[in-house]
Image (spheres, helix red, strand yellow):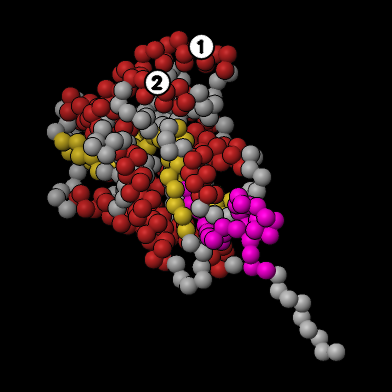
C-alpha cells in the first residue's frame, strides 16, 4: 500500500480546538507581531498641585531614585517634600504646558507614530508587523499599559527601548524593573529584548550634530555647553556608567562637529537634595562663562530624547536667567532631537537591527 502522509494539523488556533471563546494567544491573527515599547520618564497629568503630588509621590517613592532606607526617606517625602514641592513645580509646568498637554507626552506620541510609519515602510512581504507603544515610568500612559496593549495586539516578541541614550540605574534600570515585574505576572511570557543605551550610536550622534549645525547657520557661539541630567556622585562611585557614557557622547559629538575640544563643555543639571552630585554643575558653569567674557553660549541637552521641564524651563528659562544676570548676552537653547526625521531614522535603524532575527526567522 503506498505511503500516505498524515494529514496536516488544522490551521485553526488552539483555543478554537479547545472550544474556548477567549484568546489563548495562539489564535491571534497577528501572532508573529513584534511589539516595541518606547519608554521614558513620564509626566504629570496636569500642571496642578494635586496632579504633581500624585506624580511626585510615585517618582520619589522609587528606590532607584531615592536610594535611602524607607524609614529614613519616607517621612521626609510625606512630611516635607509632598507638602511644599507640588505647588512650586506645578507653576513651572504651567509655563511649558501646551494645547496638546505635556510637551514630553506629545513629543513621545509623535515619536511613536513616526517610528511606526518607518517600520511599516521597511517591512517586506512575509515579515511580522510592528506595533509601537509609549510607556512612561511614572504617570500615564504607563509601561504596564504599553505592555498590555502590545500583548492584546498579539505581539509575542517585545523589544523594550528606554529612550535614555546614556544608561543610568535611576532611569534605564528603573524602567527595566517595571518590565521584569510585569513579566513575572504573565502566564505566557513573550520573547523580550532590551536596549540598555545608545550613547554612541552613529545615527544618534549624526542627528545631534545636524541639529547643532542648523542652529550655527546663523552664527557660532563662544562656547557650546552640553548639559546632561545629573546623578549623585555616590551612584557613579558604585559603578553606574552614566557619567562615562555622557562624556563619550560628548567626545563623539565633538569629533562629528569637527570643532575644538575646548569650545565644548559637558555639564550636569537638575541636582536635588544635599548629597554631592557629579560635576560640573550646569548653572555654575554658565555663570562662570559669563563672568569670563563668553557672551554668547549655546546649550544642548543630548541626554534627553524629548524636550521636557528640565530643558524647556530649567535650561531655557531658569539657566538663561543665571547666565544673563552674570553678564552674558545671549543663551541660545538648542531643542532636543524630539521627532526630527534624522532622530526617528536613527531609532528605527536601532530597532530594525535589534529585531533582525525575529523578522527573518
From the top left corner, tell me how far across and down residue 237 is, in percent.
54, 31
How many marks overall?
2
In the image, taking residue 39 as reference, residue 21 lies left or right, namely right
Name the residue nearer the viewer: 325 or 130.
Answer: 130
Which residue, given by chain and number where applicable, does mark 2 sit on? 53
Q: Give the quadrant of residue 256.
A: bottom left
The magenta stretch is 10-37
Which residue, given by chain and number where applicable, does mark 1 sit on? 75
The verdict on residue 35 being magenta is yes
In the image, taking residue 60 as reference, residue 109 lies left or right, namely left
Circle 2: element type: helix
Position of 106 relative to 61 (above/below): below
Residue shown at 46% from the left, 55% from the top: 131
From the top left corner, tell me how far across and down residue 37 is, in percent.
48, 48
Name the residue nearer the viewer: 23 or 49.
Answer: 23
Name the residue nearer the viewer: 321 or 161.
Answer: 161
Position of 168 relative to 11 (above/below): above
The verdict on residue 116 being magenta is no
Q: Residue furthest bottom?
A: 1
Q: Give the quadrant of residue 263.
A: top left
| Label 2 environment density (alpha carbons within 10 Å; few <14, some 14–19, many ≥20) | many
Circle 1: element type: helix
From the top left corner, tell me how far across and down residue 358 is, in percent.
56, 62
Q: Nearer the viewer, mark 1 or mark 2?
A: 2
> Which quarter of the figure is the C terminus placed in?
bottom right
Whichever of callouts 1 and 2 sits on the residue coming sooner in the sequence is 2
Residue shown at 71% from the left, 74% from the top: 8
- Determine if residue 148 is in view: yes
- Determine if residue 245 is in view: no
Amino acid at each position: 500500500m503506498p505511503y500516505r502522509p498524515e494529514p496536516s494539523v488544522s490551521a485553526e488556533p488552539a483555543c478554537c480546538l479547545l472550544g474556548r471563546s477567549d484568546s489563548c494567544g495562539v489564535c491571534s491573527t497577528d501572532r508573529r507581531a513584534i511589539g516595541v515599547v518606547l519608554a521614558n520618564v513620564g509626566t504629570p497629568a496636569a500642571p496642578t498641585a494635586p496632579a504633581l503630588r500624585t506624580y511626585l509621590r510615585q517618582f520619589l517613592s522609587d528606590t532607584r531614585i531615592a536610594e535611602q532606607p524607607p524609614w529614613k526617606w519616607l517621612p521626609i517625602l510625606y512630611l516635607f517634600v509632598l507638602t511644599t514641592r507640588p505647588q512650586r513645580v506645578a507653576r513651572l509646568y504651567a509655563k511649558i504646558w501646551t494645547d496638546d498637554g505635556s510637551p514630553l507626552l506629545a513629543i513621545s506620541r509623535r515619536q511613536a507614530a513616526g517610528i511606526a510609519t518607518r517600520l511599516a515602510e521597511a517591512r517586506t512581504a512575509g515579515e511580522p508587523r510592528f506595533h509601537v507603544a509609549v510607556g512612561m515610568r511614572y504617570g500615564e500612559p504607563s509601561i504596564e499599559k504599553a505592555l498590555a496593549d502590545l500583548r492584546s495586539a498579539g505581539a509575542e516578541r517585545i523589544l523594550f527601548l528606554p529612550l535614555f541614550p546614556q544608561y543610568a540605574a535611576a532611569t534605564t534600570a528603573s524602567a527595566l524593573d517595571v518590565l521584569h515585574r510585569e513579566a513575572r505576572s504573565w502566564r505566557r511570557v513573550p520573547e523580550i529584548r532590551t536596549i540598555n543605551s545608545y550613547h554612541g550610536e552613529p545615527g544618534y550622534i549624526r542627528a545631534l550634530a545636524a541639529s547643532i549645525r542648523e542652529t550655527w547657520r546663523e552664527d557660532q557661539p563662544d562656547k557650546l555647553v552640553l548639559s546632561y541630567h545629573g546623578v549623585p556622585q555616590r551612584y557613579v562611585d558604585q559603578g553606574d556608567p552614566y557619567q562615562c557614557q555622557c562624556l563619550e557622547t560628548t567626545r563623539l559629538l565633538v569629533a562629528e562637529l569637527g570643532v575644538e575640544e575646548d569650545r565644548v563643555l559637558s555639564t550636569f543639571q537638575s541636582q536635588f537634595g544635599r548629597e554631592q552630585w557629579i560635576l560640573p554643575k550646569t548653572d555654575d558653569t554658565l555663570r562662570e562663562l559669563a563672568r569670563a567674557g563668553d557672551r554668547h553660549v549655546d546649550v544642548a541637552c543630548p541626554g534627553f530624547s524629548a524636550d521636557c521641564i528640565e530643558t524647556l524651563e530649567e535650561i531655557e528659562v531658569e539657566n538663561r536667567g543665571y547666565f544673563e544676570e552674570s553678564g552674558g548676552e545671549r543663551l541660545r537653547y538648542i531643542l532636543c532631537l524630539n521627532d526630527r526625521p534624522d532622530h526617528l531614522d536613527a531609532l528605527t535603524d536601532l530597532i530594525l537591527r535589534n529585531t533582525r532575527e525575529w523578522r527573518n526567522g
